[in-house]
Each structure stands twice: as structure tokens, then as C-alpha cells.
Amino acid sequence: MDSFMQAAIEEAQLGLQEGGIPIGSVIVHQGRIIGRGHNRRVQNGSAILHGEMDAFEDAGRQPASVYRDAVLYTTLSPCPMCTGAILLYGIPKVIIGENQTFMGDEDLLRSRGVEVEVLQDPTCVALMESFIAARPELWNEDIGE
């Protein structure tokens, strides 16, 4: 497995251990992780700290040129909010762990020229399937249902 997707999975597992939703993300620039995060909505009482948003927050202020040369890894297909952040910062490539349990706005990313790769990684699928079965109300809250 790609070491960067493994890092995103480790973030997702950390989120689950903290009592949150198991979605993790890392942002990679020139072969180095510059931002990592996991869904912290529950832990921080946040409305917006999805895994990708937390990774952007961790990466902090970067020149636009850095984001335009970065790859974002996420364990789950990005929701509309996270898709917007990817587009805003000009991330050119997104590698997604899985989109079986939730299909985000991949078509919008592709329509705006973002390269999207979906791995259908069994670990990512299992994390979300188990979580959704155990905590459907929390999952529905996270996706705005």
C-alpha cells in the first residue's frame, strides 16, 4: 500500500479511537506530508472539521504554488465542503480510499480538471461500514442528513 494512503488510514483510525468519525486525510507536496488530519467534528464540537479540512488546517498557510503542486489523500470520497476546499486551493490530484459507502463530489472535481483516483481499499471500506452500522445517527449528522 502507498505510504501516504497508509498515513491517511492511520489518521482515520486515530479519529475512531478518539470517539469520532473514521475519516483521515493527508496533503503531500514533493513527496512529503505537509498536512495531516482526521474528522474532529465530535472531538472539537465543530461543524466543519472533516478529515480533509483538518489536513488543510494542519498544513496551514501555504503559497498557492505549493497547493497547486500537491496531492490530497483521503480515506473517503470528499463531500461538497471538502471538494470546495480542494478546488479553492487548486489541488490537482486527489487519491480516494473508497467511495462505496459514500459518493462525494468526484464528478465536480473531474469537471474542474482534478485528477481523481479511487482505490476501493478494503481497510477504508471496512472502517466506514463498521462505523455507519454502529453509529448511523452520527454518520447522518456528518453528511447533513
Image: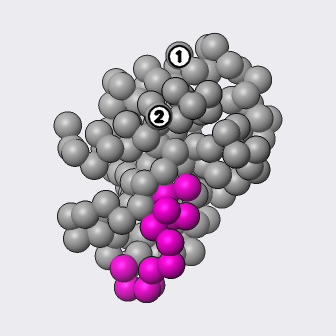
At horizontal 68% and vertical 19% (from top left) the residue drawn is 135
Q: Is residue 58 magenta?
A: yes
Q: Nearer the viewer, residue 102 or 47?
A: 47
Q: Amino acid at mark 2?
A: Leu
Q: Nearer the viewer, residue 17 or 3?
A: 17
Q: Which residues are magenta?
A: 54-66
Q: Is residue 12 visible?
A: yes
39 left or right of 115 in image: right
Image coords of residue 101 (percent x, y) = 54, 28
What secondary structure do most residues of the magenta stretch adopt? helix
1 left or right of 132 in image: left
Q: Nearer the viewer, residue 29 or 92?
A: 29
Q: Between marks 2 and 1, how big is the CA–CA gap?
A: 15 Å
Q: Is residue 113 magenta?
A: no
At horizontal 57% and vertical 21% (from top left) the residue drawn is 131
- Helix, strand or loop for disc 1: helix
Image disc number at residue 17: none
Image coords of residue 140 (percent x, y) = 74, 31
- Helix, strand or loop for disc 2: helix
Q: In which quadrant is the C terminus drawn?
A: top right
The quadrant in which residue 2 appears is top left
Image coords of residue 88 (percent x, y) = 56, 74
Q: Is residue 118 above or below residue 141?
A: below
Image disc number at residue 130: 1
Image disc number at residue 14: 2
Q: Amino acid at mark 1?
A: Ser
| Mark 2 or 1, nearer chain start | 2
At horizontal 38% and vertical 85% (from top left) the residue drawn is 65
Q: Nearer the viewer, mark 2 or mark 1?
A: 2
Q: Is residue 129 above or below residue 79?
A: above
At horizontal 48% and vertical 50% (from top left) the residue drawn is 37
